Image (spheres, rainbow, N blue to C red):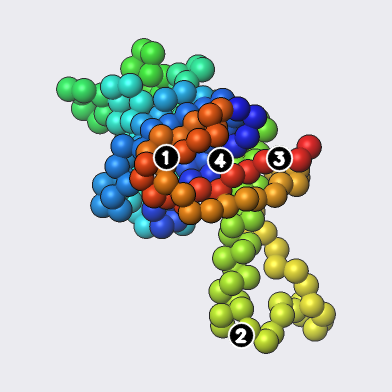
Amino acid sequence: EEGRAEILLTAGVFLRIDHRSSIRMVSNALSNTRVEFLQGSAILDSNDSTPGNSVVLTYKSFELRFPKSGVYRLDSEPEVFETYTGEAQITSKGQTPETIDESHQYFFGIGMQTRKFGDGAVDQFSEWARNRAETIEADNRAADQSAADPDAPPTSPFGTTVPVPAPAVPSYGTFGAPVFVDNGLIGSSFYNPSLGMPFGYPMQVFYIFPRW
């Protein structure tokens, strides 16, 4: 109930779940990955995926697709979807798809998009999600550098060793709370952090427990 979760859906696509949130894994096929959002808050990060990925989120009678790489947020209270970066398509039964870009948000209750003021919702959840994205990006950069030259630590122009910096991720705010990760390969067709008991389809799940 008080923990957050990070789920790797497909290559380069992460779904991050806030406290008191739940989802249901409908299909884990790489060519047709479908997740039903039930309640709470979720952020989908596809910044490192290829455009036109196969991930589909559903909420009530709505389907959400993500033809462009980006970062997207879905909340059930209030019932709103917004695009931090990228572009999403929302379809309701029998309706023409609507495109939601970075300057708009979509209210499910009235089935309408409106112009968004500012950069979108910023709270502890979005800051944690940004921190996770930066950590993963830094790890990937370090791994790439190690593969290119395993014996050469990163150096500055002056020849001194420097840590690999975490790149700026403009789609979130900043967050400095330390976290530790307990990860494992488990099954999940339904995941609810309040229950703490996943089961069903296989997926990689990372449990994130803030220590603040």
Residue at disc 2, secondary structure: loop
Instruction: Kindly identify which residue carries mark 1.
Output: 199
Instruction: Kindly identify which residue carries mark 3.
Output: 210
Determine the CA span between mark 3 and mark 2.
Answer: 34 Å
| Camera-side mark, 1 or 4 | 1
Residue 62 image label: none
Determine the image quadrant of residue 158.
Answer: bottom right
Residue at image point 36% right, 45% down: 201
Residue at disc 3, secondary structure: strand
Residue type at the position of mark 2: Asp
Q: Is residue 199 above or below residue 143?
A: above
- Tell whether label 3 touches label 1 (CB within 8 Å): no
Earlier-in-chain disc, 1 versus 2: 2
Q: Is residue 178 visible?
A: yes
Instruction: Kindly identify which residue carries mark 4.
Output: 5
Residue at image point 82% right, 80% down: 160
Residue type at the position of mark 1: Phe
Residue 149 image label: 2
Q: Nearer the viewer, residue 111 or 197?
A: 197
Residue type at the position of mark 4: Ala
- Tell whether label 3 touches label 4 (CB within 8 Å): no
Q: How many marks?
A: 4
